[in-house]
Structure formats: C-alpha cells, structure tokens
Amino acid sequence: MRVFRLSLILISSIVLLSGCASTNSDGNNENNTNNINNTNNTNNTNNNTGACSSYCPEDKICVGESDEHSTCVEPCPCDDNHECYDGGCVDLFNDENNCGSGGNYCSGECINGSCTDACASAGTSCSNNETCCQIAGSYVCKNTSTDFYNCGDCAYECDDENANACVNGQCACGTTSACTGDMTCCSNSCKDLSTDVYNCGACGNACGTGLSCTDGQCMCGDQACDFGESCCGNYCADLDNDPTNCGECNNNCGTSNGCQSGQCTCGTSGEICRGEFSGTGFTHDPANGICMQMYTCTEECCGDGCKITIASSMLGAAEADPNNCGECGNSCNGNTCCCFDLMGMGDPSCECCSSGESCGMAGCEPASK
C-alpha cells in the first residue's frame, strides 16, 4: 500500500514539472514573436536619404524599384503586418518606396497602400515616366531618366564638365558614361584638355596648323600662340590676316598687298582679285574688270587694283586690259590688247595690236576687216 502511494506522488511530480516546462516555453515563444514584430515595425520605414545601400546594415536588406528609392528592412520571413517582397519585409500600407505593392515608388505620401502624389495635390498629375520633385518650394513633374538637372533623382544635377546628358537616370557624355579623372566632356566624348589639339585648354579651342597642345596651351615650338593662329616654321601666324602667310603658311601676297579672310587683297584698294573666273557681264570692259558672258578671264593684282590681264573666248580672240596685256605692267600704249586661242582650247596668247588694228576672231586684224 505504501509503495502504491509513493508511485502516485512520483507520477504527480513529473506531471507538474512537465506542465511548468511547457508553460515557460510558450511564454518564451510569445516574447520572441513580439520581439520580431517590434523589430520589423521599427525598421520598415526609410528614415535616411540617398542610396539605400549606403546606410543599410548587412543584416538587413534594401527593397524598392531602385537603390535611391528603396527601404532598409528586415529579411523574410515576415509578421502579419508585412509582406515579403524581393527577400525583405515591407509595409505596403505606409512605405513610400513600396506603396500598395513591392517596388511601387510613391513621390508623395503612402496612405493605406495608396499614393497621394504631391504634384497631383498641387494640380498637376505626373505621367508614368515622371517623378514629382519639390524644386524651389514648388512641386513639379520631372523625367528623372533624361533630365540633366534631376538625373536619377530629384535635384541631382549632373556636372557639366563631366557630362552633357542624362541617359536612363545616369549622367552621361553623349551616350556613354560621364567622364572621370582629368577628362572633360566635349562634343559627346571625353577629352584631355591639356593635350588635345582640337580642344586645347577648353572645349572647341582647336590649335591651328602645325601647333601642338601642351598643358592646355597651343604651342609653336617653344612659343605660345593665340587662339586661331597657326605655326609657320617657329612663328605664330594668323592665316586670315597675315599677308606673308595668307590662307596658308608661306603664301606671300607681295609688297604693299594685304590679307583678308585668308585671301590676298590688292594694294590699298582692299580688293580680292578673282584669278581665273567665268564672265557674267553683257558689256565687255576689261579695263574696268567686266568680263563678257562665255568668256574666261584672269584677274591679277596690278599696282593698286585688280586688272583682267588675260581673256579667252570660244569664238576666237578676246580683249584684255590694254595697260596690263598678258601680265601686269605690259602697256599697249593706247592700242588694243588681243588674246587669241583655238576656239577656247589651250592657253591664250595675248599681244598688243598695232595702230589701226582691232581684235577679231583670228586675233589682231586690220580695222577695215
């Protein structure tokens, strides 16, 4: 009888001990669950700005449509108040980076899973490819994929030395990545302004003929040249205005002549002689520079003015300047200067006609014919 009672006591003690252990275990589980819930609720809101990866600790995860528009949250599994999306627990009811659904960025406020767009509230709804940005105290819609001054995010302005465009939310030089280091974005490509002869010291500052670019300065030998000058030997020359290097190095316009826009001007007249040209005038007046239609004339600088020294015609002979017949200074002393060729073929031969002769189809002919 005593043995039976001892057995009952032992069994009761074991049952009681087992019940106590079970109660403590349930209490611990409940506390752990609460701790997880509290942790998720604390960390599901993005209280930082900029790229999420720059501040999110390693034991958490960034969730959203982009690094700039992500929230730092606890990894899955999640409590009942959070949704597991892309490996992280997000609050679809209040998270502006995951509003209503994972990765759905809201540029305004996220209230009960619906986005209240600040721009829409101000009277302008943004389209699908636009973001509502607050600029100078006002809300405006910007395409952050292409806007140079809001590239990738509101108010992020690209550096105009390194980039000239915004492509897919990234600052770019043309269609490639923005320039880095000592490179500068010029005409859609990255250039080294210290050595590039076409962009020396500044974009578009092209060094002239024969110049090199050293430390951003156009150089002719050891001489620094100004913008627009070329290197002729070891001399910086302005080919537009230098009469000794007019249009190109060593093109000397001659004594007393000038140079204008790379072309030699004649004496003090400032005229630019036309060289060989086709006639357009109906009146043939070689002494005054008028060349008849269907004529080919050569105009040269003679003294202080441009003169027609040679003329040719498909009809036979043609008249040139009698004071500069065939060449400058060859005067016919009041007689006619007649240039003859074979029906416009070959170089014409010019001669002064004798007294009483005129220029006919065969050259100098007696005036009676």
Image (spheres, grey):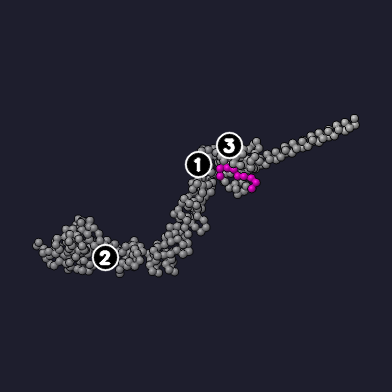
Residue linked to disc 1: 129
Residue at 77% x, 37% y is 24
Where 235 falls versus 277 (above or below)? below
- Residue drawn at x 39%, y 63% as measured from the top left: 209
Sequence-first tag of 2 and 3 = 3
Q: Magenta span covers which residues?
A: 58-66
Residue nearer the viewer, 205 or 25: 25
Pointer 2 residue: 301
Q: Which residue is mark 3?
A: 100
Toward the top, the furthest residue is 1
Q: Earlier in the sequence, mark 3 or mark 1?
A: 3
- Against 249, is 186 above or below? above
Which residue type does callout 2 highlight?
Cys
Name the kind of residue labelled 3 in the image.
Gly
Q: CA distance from mark 2 to mark 3?
A: 85 Å
Q: Residue furthest right?
A: 2
Residue located 37% across and 64% down the image? 238
- Residue 304, position as x, y percentages in the image: 26, 66
Which residue is at the far left?
Answer: 368
Q: Position of residue 240 (x, y in %)?
A: 35, 62
Q: Quadrant of the C terminus?
A: bottom left
How far across and down, in percent of the image, does residue 97 sit? 58, 41
Q: Tell me how far mark 3 sits from mark 1, CA to CA.
A: 18 Å
- Is the residue under label 3 in contact with that under label 2 (CB below 8 Å)? no
Name the mark nearer the viewer: 2 or 3: 3
> Looking at the picture, which amino acid does disc 1 mark?
Asn
